[in-house]
Amino acid sequence: MPVEGAADLAEWKPDSWRRCPALQQPEYPDPAALERVLAELRQLPPLVTSWEVMLLREQLAEAAAGTRFVLQGGDCAERFVDCRPARITNTLKVLLQMSLVLVVGAERPVIRIGRFAGQYAKPRSANEETLDGVCLPSYRGDIINRPEFTAEARTPDPDLLLRGYERAALALNFIRALVKGGFADLHHPEYFDLDWVEHSPLADEYHQMAQTIRDALRFMENVLGVRAGDSDRIDFFTAHEALHLGYESAQTRQVPRRPGFFNLTAHFPWVGFRTNQPEGAHIEYLRGIENPVGVKVGVDTTREQVARWIEALDPQRRPGRLTLIHRFGASRIADALPKLIEAVRAEGGQALWVCDPMHGNTQMTSSGVKTRNFEDIISEVEQSFDLHRSMGQKLGGVHIELTGENVTECIGGTRGPSEADLARAYESEVDPRLNYEQSLELAFLIARKMKSDR
Ligand code: PEP
Ligand code: CO
């Protein structure tokens, strides 16, 4: 249903965003050096292909129709130092394990989307940070500057864009090789056991479930003689916040035999809560690409904003094109989500609904440590399922900040850290992530919720 006065793509170019106010962009001391880097980035091979992008869009359309479920997860901010084989495999493992648990709970295929291979740029609430009277630019992610509190480290360096692109390529190359080589083969869930699975109280439940899946596959293949889809080749898609518009637009191009422009740095770029202004540069950038796109939405979202997002991003109401990733916070979702759903309906929108139970539930401890409470996260997810259901639709997925490492960043869960434990293994430079066990526990709770709702 094309809309009267829908935004005109003839006016759009990969860099037409430059006409609009662009928030959260770093200030480089040498703009000519930035331009040289962007010119080089434009020449490099892409990280993903338009075929994969379109496949994800089709799958997201199915998720919007309630026949698939999205699991999107990974670091808040990837760090260059974490481009290491063990780190990458641990992230894959936790996402795979969670997805198996969710498949069983949802009884529908799960689309796995990693916040990886490019999740390097971060929006910040303040442009500067002051420490002992010294004021420096805020850390904005490894692709922009470095976290150490020195003038040298905090000065945005355009070469980091190339370093980030290369690391994204290395990570993705490894992920693709692992998946192709059978790492994610459902016949062998032991390939993606994490070392500390054995010590977890969830281990038995998980292993029983993995055994059930293995048995079901054997039954289908040996007794019924049918191949169970792509059970030996599970796909991962990549996603990151499309924050640094120079980086995103440098790899936005046309491809042979398909109309339109594609962002080829990731399958699924999303725009964050701080840069989602309908008249802003980030929405202007997103509206011209063919990728499925996400918009983070939260409290204070107005009907008018919803109308303008839909008009700009999905004038033809194509299922799978637009995902609304809502992040209200456990105490506010009940009031805010139904209004948002009504606003989208009023526009005839076809959004896929994904719950991010992380970013509305961030809090500071009395000693000033950024954390999140597992109870709040669970509460927001459970309320999401109920609220969507009470409005006659389905929650289509979850978006989680997590890691396969044994960190202590979020409080709670069955064996989770308490506030006093946070210092033990707090690694994140930005937002606190669920550790391996908390992530798996969350998956079990979601699976139970989906089962009991059926
Ligand atoms: C994020 O996803 O890391 C983030 C900054 O989220 P939001 O834009 O929702 O605040
Ligand atoms: Co975050």
Image (cartoon, helix red, strand yellow):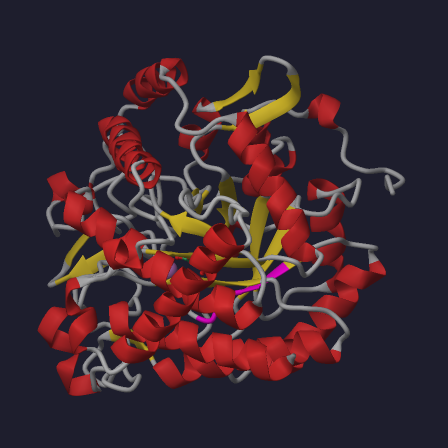
User: In the picture, residue 427 is in which quadrant?
Assistant: bottom left
User: In the picture, residue 42 is in which quadrant?
Assistant: top left
Can you say whether 1 is above or below 16 in the image?
below
Q: Is residue 399 magenta?
A: no
Query: Residue 143, how many percent across, how many down?
Result: 28, 38
Query: Residue 443, how many percent across, how many down?
Result: 42, 72
Can you say whether 332 is above or below 252 in the image?
below
Residue at position x 41%, y 37% in the image: 244
Q: Which residues are magenta?
A: 353-357
In the rendered view of the protein, which quadrant contains the C terminus?
bottom right
Of the pair 376 and 177, the residue shown nearer to us: 177
Residue at position x 45%, y 36% in the image: 266
- Image region (quadrant) for ligand 2: bottom left
In the rendered view of the protein, which quadrant contains the N terminus?
top right
Query: Residue 265, how many percent across, how many down?
Result: 43, 31
Residue at position x 19%, y 51% in the image: 87
Q: Please indicate, yes or no, whether residue 85 appears anywhere in the rendered image.
A: yes
